[in-house]
Image: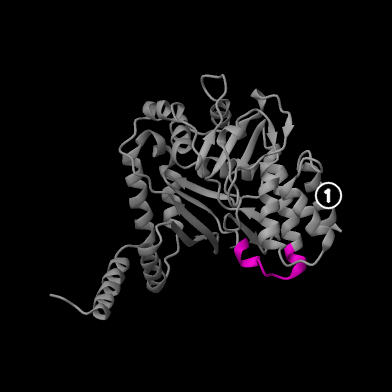
Amino acid sequence: MHLPPGQLKVVLILALLQELQVKPQSDLFQELFEKDLQLCPDCFSGQREQCEEIFQKIAEPSDWSRLLKALSLLVDQRTIYFLELKEDHKETKVVAKRKDINVQKHEAENVVKEFLELEERPGGFHLCRTSLSKPRFVDYLAQRGHASASTWFYMMHYVSPLLMQDLYLLEFPVPQTHASCGLTHFQSYAGRTLVDYAEAEENLRLELSRQLLQLSLKLTFGFSDFRIYLTDFTADNLAYDEDSKKVVLIDLDSLVLVDAASTSGQAQKYEPLPGEGFTFDVSAFCSGQQLDANIYQACLLLRDVLLKTIDNERLQLLLEQCVACQDDLCDMRFQQAYDLIKLLDS
C-alpha cells in the first residue's frame, strides 16, 4: 500500500507517539544502561545502584515532548535529553548526554592495550604519552575512587564522565554530575549556550568575556600537574547560568591532557596551523611546553562572536594582538589575557 507523503507523515507521527506512550523515560534509560553493561560488564557494573536511583527520579515528560525528541533524533543524531529529576519535593533540571559508539563487547584488559596503542588523535580525548608505562593520570583517578576498567574505557571513548565529576569538585566551572550510567552522563542543566548571547546587552557580554579569559587561564594551569587544552573552545560548548551568573563549560569531550610533572614547564607561544578557526597539531600540545592555546581560542571567540560589535578601540586592539600575537609585539598571549581581564574589570 502506497500512501501520499502527507498521510505517511501522519502515520509515522502516530506510530512514534504510540511507541513513546508505552515506554517511560526511566525504562528507556534502564534499557540503554543494560545495553552498555553488555558492552563492558567490568566497566559499568559498579554504577548500577546509583543509576537505578536516578532512573526512578526522572519525571515523565508530556507525550508531545517525547514525540518532538523522537522526531529530532531522525535528523540529529546527538542524543541529548533535557530532563527533570524529582527529589526532596522539588524538581531539578538535568541534561542527559549519551555517546553511542560502534564497537563490539570489550574485555577490560583489551581496553588498556587498545588505549596504550592509540596513535595521536586530532579529535576527541588525547592523553600525552610519558616515559611511564602506566599514565600518572590513571593513578590519579584511582586515588579519586574511579574503577580501573571504567577509567580506561572512558579515556578511550568518552572522557566527559571522568573529568566532569572531578573538575566540579575542584571548583572548575563545569556542571555538577548527578550520575554516569555507562555511556549516558547526567549533568546539571547550566543554561543556554553562548550562541544565544552573541547579541546580548553589552555589559553582560563584557562580563561573559572576562570569565572566558579566566577560564582559559584556569584550564592551562590545570590541576594536580595536569594541563587541559581544549580543542573545541566554541560558543556552543559553553553556557551561561543566569542563576549563578557564571559561564560554564558543558562539554569536555575534545581535549588534550598533558602531564606537566613530566615536562620542563617552559611557557611557549602557540602557532596555529594554516586554516580557518582553531587549527592544531596534537604533537604541539605534547611537546612539553606550557602553551597559550586556550587563550588564543578564547580571544578568537571574543573577537569573532561576543565582542564583535563592541565599539572600544583599546579592547579591539588587545583582542587583535592576542589572536595574531606577532613576534615583534608578542612573546606569548598570557600578558594579553591579563591586560584584557583588567580592562574588562574596569
Crowding at label 1, few (<14), some or many (≥20) Cα neighbours within 10 Å?
Answer: some
Is 239 situated left or right of 76 in this image? right
Residue in the image at 42% along x and 46% along y: 183
Secondary structure mostly seen in the magenta stretch: helix
Under circle 1, the secondary element is helix
User: What is the x, y in percent for residue 345?
Assistant: 83, 56
Quickly name the residue at label 1: 339
Residue in the image at 73% along x and 67% along y: 309
Relative to 277, say whether 195 is above or below: below
**Figure coloring:** one colour
The answer to whether residue 208 is seen in the rendering is yes
Is 41 magenta? The answer is no
Residue in the image at 35% along x and 63% along y: 74
Callout 1, which amino acid?
Answer: Asp
Residue in the image at 27% along x and 70% along y: 18
- The residue nearer to you, when weighing 39 against 321, is 321
Q: In this picture, which residue range is highlighted in magenta?
A: 194-205
The answer to whether residue 214 is seen in the rendering is no
Outermost residue toward the right in this view:
346
Relative to 278, say whether 20 is above or below: below
Q: Quadrant of the C terminus?
A: bottom right
